[in-house]
Image: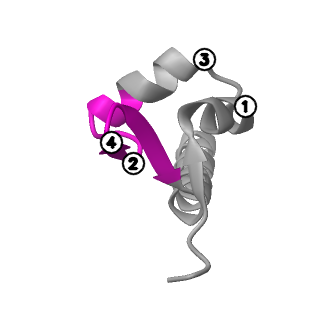
C-alpha cells in the first residue's frame, strides 16, 4: 500500500481536461472513484487510470457495434 498515490480534484481535472467542480460532482455522484478526506476529495491514481481505460474501452465497444 506504500505505492498508493492520491490525486487532488485539481490534478484529476487536469488529467481529464475537466474543471475541478465537474470532477467533484462526478465523485459526489459516485461516477468517479474517490473519497472525501475532511473537506477535500482524494482520488487513487490507479483507480482514475482504470476508470479512463474502462471509459475508452466502452467507447470503442460502442463504435464496433455501430459499424456492424
Which residue is denoted by mark 1 in the rendering? 14
| Residues at marks 1 and 4 touching, judged by CB atoms closer than 8 Å | no
Q: Is residue 33 above or below residue 5?
A: above
Mark 2: secondary structure: loop
Q: CA distance from mark 4 to mark 2?
A: 7 Å
> Could you say which is closer to the camera, residue 49 or residue 4?
4
Quarter where residue 26 is shown = top left
Magenta stretch containing residue 37, yes or no?
Answer: yes
> Could you say which is closer to the camera, residue 2 or residue 20?
2
Which residue is denoted by mark 4 in the rendering? 36
| Residues at marks 4 and 3 touching, judged by CB atoms closer than 8 Å | no
Q: Residue at x 41, y 42 (%)?
A: 32
> Could you say which is closer to the camera, residue 61 or residue 66?
61
**Residue 64 coordinates in the image, percent (x, y):** 61, 50
Magenta stretch containing residue 36, yes or no?
Answer: yes
**Residue 56 coordinates in the image, percent (x, y):** 62, 49
Q: CA distance from mark 2 to mark 1?
A: 16 Å
Which residue is denoted by mark 2 in the rendering? 34
**Residue 57 coordinates in the image, percent (x, y):** 58, 55
Q: Residue at x 62, y 38 (%)?
A: 12
Q: CA distance from mark 4 to mark 3?
A: 18 Å
Mark 1 vs 3, N-terminal side: 1
Q: CA distance from mark 1 to mark 4?
A: 19 Å
Which residue is denoted by mark 3 in the rendering? 19
Mark 1: secondary structure: helix
Amino acid at each position: 500500500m506504500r505505492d498508493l498515490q492520491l490525486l487532488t480534484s485539481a490534478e484529476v481535472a487536469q488529467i481529464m481536461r475537466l474543471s475541478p467542480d465537474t470532477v467533484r460532482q462526478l465523485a459526489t455522484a459516485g461516477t468517479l472513484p474517490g473519497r472525501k478526506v475532511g473537506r477535500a476529495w482524494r482520488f487513487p491514481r490507479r483507480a482514475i487510470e482504470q476508470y479512463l481505460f474502462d471509459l475508452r474501452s466502452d467507447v470503442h465497444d460502442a463504435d464496433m457495434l455501430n459499424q456492424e
